[in-house]
Image (cartoon, rainbow, N blue to C red):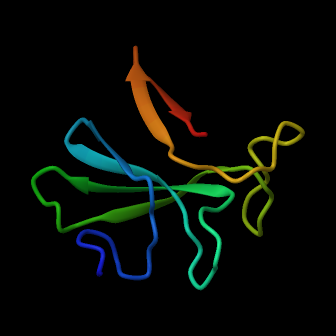
Amino acid sequence: MPNPILPAWEYIPDGEPRVFGDRVYLYGSHDRAAQSDFCDYKLKVWSAPLDDLNNWVCHGHSFHTRDDRDHKSDTEGMTDRKLFAPDVIEKDGKYYLYAI
């Protein structure tokens, strides 16, 4: 079944939409194309204006548990495990990202 909001090549399971300001943000795990296992060592973020939900923009990876070509791990020495079901909350102007 085609993805109704993101490009067909993008795999974001466990997506959590959150509205901050005039945009909706989709925080999610990241499945790798052509793989037999689920989720990755990265989290991705997409967003769209609330008044134009056909215009999604990728903000890239928001968190890594392993080094890759472009980023060092955000958890060096703590964990290198896969990330599942992320979510973000805002409190007092700060944003908190968490995953299991």
Residue 55, how many percent across, how many down? 22, 67
Quadrant for residue 33, please give it.
bottom right
- In this rendering, the count of numbered labels is 0
State the residue lying farthest toward the top: 92
State the residue lying farthest toward the right: 77
Residue 61, how many percent across, how many down? 57, 57
Quarter of the figure with the N terminus: bottom left
In this picture, residue 52 sits left or right of residue 4: left
Against 53, residue 21 (above or below) is: above
Against 33, residue 60 (above or below) is: above
- For the point 40% across and 14% down, which residue is it? 92
- For the point 80% across and 58% down, which residue is it? 67
State the residue lying farthest toward the front: 36
Against 100, residue 72 (above or below) is: below
Residue 80, how many percent across, how many down? 81, 49
- For the point 36% across and 82% down, which residue is it? 8
State the residue lying farthest toward the left: 51
In this picture, residue 24 sits left or right of residue 58: left
In this picture, residue 82 sits left or right of residue 11: right
Quarter of the figure with the C terminus: top right
- For the point 59% across and 74% down, which residue is it? 32
